[in-house]
Image (cartoon, rainbow, N blue to C red):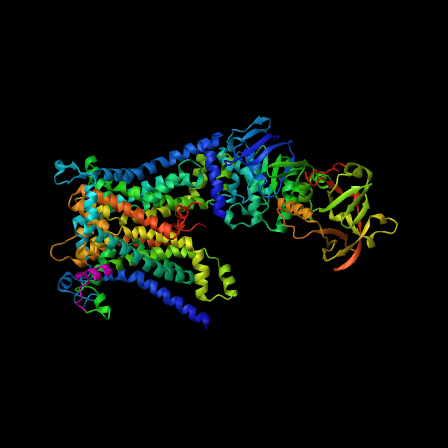
């Protein structure tokens, strides 16, 4: 009896979690199928009203939009490059932090911690100024560099937490077996750390994909503007009323890569998110 | 106890590193410095250097619309900012958002964590769905909630019994703030619950069974066994989330653009620098924003006695 | 194959505390040497200095006559079995064993021959394609040994290799290691905190305490002629009994009575005040099982047995006694140093299985004072060593 009650509670809790997580997503999907006329005239309610549906019209519209298409390319390119570079650098740094004894380790860790908590907005002024001087304002590198700097702490933490899981003895065993430090790293640590590196890459990609502050501050045209910024500037044909349903379609498109990553790698992502939070 | 010993051992090794006695430790030190140099330089290039530059610029009256009129004015920008009621109102907004959202996230996130800890079936489904709000772009979350609260196209009004169907949530301060915080809480609670779930997993079943045998009720187990043992996990989660919430910007930008006095301190800074090109006063605000984050971090660390080594993952 | 010479080896950490202090040991070619001691005695540090995973603060480490202080581990050509085996989880058993050879860039054909040979020796043939995660503790242990024997290393080093196995497997693996070492005839240094492993495996055993070498001797010598209280208490299970004693007129006075002492022992200890007598459990016997006529009645005493443990082939009986606070403190200190607890002052005696001494009853016991050692309680030195 008691067990049944506990189970019911758990099931109810699961249902609540699912509703919490998926309802707003379902809502924006539903909104993206409302026709533009219905939205302009007012179409309250969760689902498109009868006759107020738009089919795929909003999606074709958003995908035909040059600005939006360019912003997708920008986001994918910038996020991927930033992720790749950031993870490579973070792997080296995390290896040093987790495995080697050296002066200044505390400094590196503290710097990473401070940067992870840094109020991003307080940097956009000076960066705006600097980037214009350096000529990388409104370019891909102009976003890739700050994305790297701000994803490095996350990646370094996640990776050093993963690296710590690999027992010390493993690497020493490799050295006794005749490996140089570099061989021990490449032949023993890298294969063992690969899953962690992959996880760090996904988290880094999420961060870069999600960024908004740099995206609107350090770009001025669609030449480098990423999706979040493009969405917020999206006005459509009629500047006086925001095309909610087209925007929703754009939002859904922007969310698809995230959902795909989550579907395939949920286990790894959870491991990565919590690796730094709790010491085993 | 164990961590103290580990720290001592580390201190010992640290000293060893200062006086390398063989090829091995010397090369270890060299290798490590090589490995961290580039990431460290990059992190500092985009943070420390601009911050110093902001500090410098904040001493000038400097507008990009009239760059030639730049002149040194000492601390006047700070005086202007600190005596302006808008600065204090926006700081108040930010602090309020931080406290309310983190409190909600903590309670709901803990409830979610308890459910996920218990659940034995469909773990993959739950985990997948919990990650979706985490992964969704904040801007998208802002739009979703903005439209959900909209009185022309949303569903919230028709679903909430005590609100009229044509109530305009974005017509006044309080309801606008509720909408903003709803989006913020929705997006970040799952992350909080994952951190807490990891902490929960560290509380051993044996200990809980021992408490059961000792006669503790469910609430007593929660308060006297589970929570004290999760303290470190909770504190680190609160610290990170609070500082994150203090930077709130995306949701406000998308949902209200600061209308009805819903501006946050980040938004004010952004508006001065990027929209109005006031680099002088904007830089002063940047410095103040940075300092206030430090103050918030300091207060949380001191108030809850968070062990920073936990956050830094040492020991 | 090589000798290992340690000359005045010192290891100091940052706080200046010497983890290993002035240790000199020569390991002969092909010898099986055990480093044993309680946790924190520096035995593992010493081993790691041999293999090159710890720096040597001062002193010389010679392997095969060559000074290796500044050589990296890979240049020392030693092989080591770690406590947690340190198997590479991403590699199969085959590749784990082949790993050192691959690093040395051997040809595939030669590697295969070597790995097959090692796997045959260690009975791993059917597991070669499995990953370490799918192996039992004993199998992992064998893979770790396979990785060690596959290359022609100058010496084997073992760091508490059996401590993660259950008691039964530990016994089997112990025999296996001994057999392998005999067969390969390779110099071996083996660290353990388990005195049974130390006694059964080693040609010689080095007992360490707080970084200092206490005694380096054969197992038999350690057991029969311990140089000090620490070694006497650490080696042997159940441990040697320590009793307050005074020697006068060729007789030793213990809490249970006064007994005659052999003349040579008496000569060295007479008139030195309060001493510590050490006598092993098997040097007592129940008088009722000793053949008539063989009994020396001057060396018997009445004892009150409170607990008896019957093990089948023998039995242990516990005889509590009162001791002065000073003696008690010293016994406690001694117990603490060897990682054990002493709850009360009691005598442990090993009786013949045939003895029918009952619990909570009085029995007459025989004490063999010929085998007794007498220690200086202040320095801990054995005053009767060699006698």
Picture coordinates of residue C135 (x, y %)? 54, 49
**Magenta-drawn stretch contains B167:** yes
Left or right of B209, for residue C363: right
Q: Position of residue B234 (x, y in %)?
A: 39, 55
The foreground one among C189 and B292 is B292
Q: Residue furthest right?
A: C293
Q: Where C47 falls versus B88 (above or below)? A: above
Along the viewing direction, whichever of A159 and C112 lies nearer the viewer:
A159
> In which quadrant will I find the N terminus of chain C?
top right
C66 sits to left or right of C268? left
Toward the bottom, the furthest residue is A1
At 24% from the left and 71% from the top, the residue drawn is: B161
Tell me the quarter of the picture where residue A23 sits: bottom left
Residue B33 picture quarter:
top left
Of helix, strand and loop, which mostly describes the magenta segment? helix
Where residue A260 appears, as percent x and y from the top left, is: 31, 53
Residue at position x 69%, y 51% in the image: C345
**Does the image show residue A225?**
no
Asked if residue C288 is among those painted magenta in the image, a careful observer would answer: no
Q: Is residue B233 visible?
A: yes
The image position of residue C381, as x and y in percent, is 70, 38
Q: How many marks?
A: 0
Left-right relation of B171 to B287: left
Q: Which residues are magenta?
A: B165-179
Quarter holding the C terminus of chain C is top right
């Amino acid at each position: 009896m008691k067990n049944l009650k506990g189970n019911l509670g758990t099931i109810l809790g699961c249902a609540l979690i699912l509703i919490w997580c998926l309802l707003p997503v379902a809502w924006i999907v539903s909104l993206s199928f409302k026709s533009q006329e219905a939205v302009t005239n007012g179409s309250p309610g969760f689902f498109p009203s009868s006759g107020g549906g738009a089919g795929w019209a909003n999606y074709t519209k958003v995908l035909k939009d040059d600005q939006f298409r360019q912003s997708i390319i920008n986001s994918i390119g910038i996020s991927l490059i930033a992720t790749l570079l950031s993870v490579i650098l973070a792997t080296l740094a995390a290896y040093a932090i987790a495995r080697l004894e050296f002066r200044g380790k505390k400094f590196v860790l503290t710097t990473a911690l401070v940067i992870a908590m840094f109020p991003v907005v307080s940097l956009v002024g000076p960066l705006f100024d600097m980037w214009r001087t350096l000529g990388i304002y409104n370019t891909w590198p102009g976003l890739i560099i700050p994305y790297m700097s701000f994803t490095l702490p996350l990646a370094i933490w996640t990776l050093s937490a993963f690296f710590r899981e690999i027992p010390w003895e493993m690497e020493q065993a490799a050295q006794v077996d005749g490996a140089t430090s570099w061989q021990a790293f490449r032949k023993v640590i890298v294969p063992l750390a690969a899953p962690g590196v992959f996880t760090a890459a996904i988290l880094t990609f999420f961060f870069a994909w999600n960024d908004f502050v740099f995206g609107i501050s350090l770009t001025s045209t669609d030449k480098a503007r990423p999706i979040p910024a493009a969405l917020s500037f999206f006005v459509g044909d009629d500047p006086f009323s925001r095309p909610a349903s087209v925007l929703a379609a754009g939002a859904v498109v922007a969310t698809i890569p995230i959902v795909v990553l989550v579907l395939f790698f949920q286990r790894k992502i959870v491991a990565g998110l919590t690796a730094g939070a709790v010491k085993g | 106890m164990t961590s103290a010993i580990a720290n001592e051992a580390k201190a010992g090794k640290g000293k060893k590193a200062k006086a390398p006695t063989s090829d091995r430790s010397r090369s270890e030190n060299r290798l490590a410095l090589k490995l961290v140099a580039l990431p460290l330089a990059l992190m500092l290039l985009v943070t420390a250097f601009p911050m110093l530059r902001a500090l410098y610029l904040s001493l000038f009256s400097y507008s990009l619309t009239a760059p030639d009129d730049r002149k040194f004015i000492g601390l006047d920008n700070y005086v202007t900012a600190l005596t302006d009621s808008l600065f204090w109102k926006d700081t108040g907004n930010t602090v309020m958002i931080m406290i309310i959202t983190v409190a909600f996230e903590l309670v709901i996130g803990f409830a979610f964590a308890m459910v996920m800890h218990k659940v034995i079936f469909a773990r993959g489904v739950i985990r997948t769905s919990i990650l979706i709000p985490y992964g969704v772009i904040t801007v998208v979350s802002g739009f979703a909630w903005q439209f959900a609260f909209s009185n022309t196209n949303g569903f919230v009004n028709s679903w909430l019994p005590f609100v009229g169907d044509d109530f305009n949530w974005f017509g006044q301060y309080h309801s606008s703030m509720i909408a903003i915080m709803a989006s913020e809480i929705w997006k970040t609670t799952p992350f909080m619950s994952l951190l807490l779930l990891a902490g929960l997993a560290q509380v051993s079943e044996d200990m809980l069974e021992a408490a059961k045998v000792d006669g503790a009720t469910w609430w007593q187990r929660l308060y006297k066994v589970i929570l004290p043992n999760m303290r470190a996990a909770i504190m680190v989660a609160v610290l990170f989330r609070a500082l994150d919430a203090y930077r709130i910007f995306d949701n406000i930008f998308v949902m209200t653009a600061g209308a009805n006095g819903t501006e946050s301190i980040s938004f004010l800074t952004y508006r001065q620098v990027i929209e109005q090109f006031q680099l002088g006063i904007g830089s002063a605000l940047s410095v103040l924003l940075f300092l206030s984050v430090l103050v918030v971090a300091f207060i949380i660390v001191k108030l809850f006695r968070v062990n920073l080594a936990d956050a830094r993952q040492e020991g | 194959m090589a000798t290992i010479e340690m000359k005045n080896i010192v290891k100091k950490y940052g706080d200046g505390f010497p983890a290993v202090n002035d240790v000199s040991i020569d390991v002969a070619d092909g010898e099986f040497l055990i480093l044993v001691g309680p946790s924190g005695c520096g035995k593992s540090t010493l081993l790691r200095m041999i293999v090159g995973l710890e720096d040597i603060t001062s002193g010389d480490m010679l392997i095969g006559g060559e000074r290796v202080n500044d050589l990296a581990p890979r240049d020392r050509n030693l092989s080591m079995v770690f406590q947690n085996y340190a198997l590479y989880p991403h590699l199969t058993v085959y590749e784990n064993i082949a790993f050192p050879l691959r690093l040395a860039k051997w040809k595939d054909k030669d590697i295969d021959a070597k790995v097959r040979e090692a796997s045959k020796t260690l009975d791993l043939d059917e597991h070669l394609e499995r990953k370490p995660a799918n192996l039992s503790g004993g199998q992992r242990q064998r893979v770790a040994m396979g990785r060690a024997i596959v290359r022609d290393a100058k010496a084997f080093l073992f760091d508490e290799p059996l401590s993660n196995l259950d008691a039964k497997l530990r016994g089997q693996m112990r025999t296996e290691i001994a057999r392998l070492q005999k067969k390969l005839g390779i110099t071996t240094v083996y660290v353990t905190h388990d005195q049974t492993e130390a006694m059964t495996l080693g040609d010689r055993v080095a007992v360490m305490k707080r970084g200092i070498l206490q005694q380096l001797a054969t197992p038999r010598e350690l057991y029969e002629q311990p140089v000090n209280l620490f070694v006497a208490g650490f080696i042997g299970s159940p441990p040697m009994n320590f009793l307050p004693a005074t020697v006068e007129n060729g007789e030793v006075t213990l809490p249970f009575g006064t007994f005659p002492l052999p003349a040579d022992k008496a000569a060295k200890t007479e008139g030195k005040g309060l001493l510590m007598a050490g006598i092993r459990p098997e040097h007592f016997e129940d008088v009722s099982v000793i053949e008539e006529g063989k009994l020396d009645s001057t060396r018997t005493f009445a004892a009150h047995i409170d607990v008896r443990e019957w093990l089948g082939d023998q039995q242990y009986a516990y005889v509590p006694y009162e001791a002065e606070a000073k003696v008690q403190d010293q016994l406690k200190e001694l117990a603490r140093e060897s990682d054990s607890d002493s709850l009360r002052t009691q005598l442990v005696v090993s009786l013949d299985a045939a003895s029918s001494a009952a619990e909570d009853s009085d029995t007459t016991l025989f004490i063999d004072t010929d085998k007794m050692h007498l220690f200086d309680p202040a320095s801990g030195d054995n005053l009767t060593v060699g006698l």
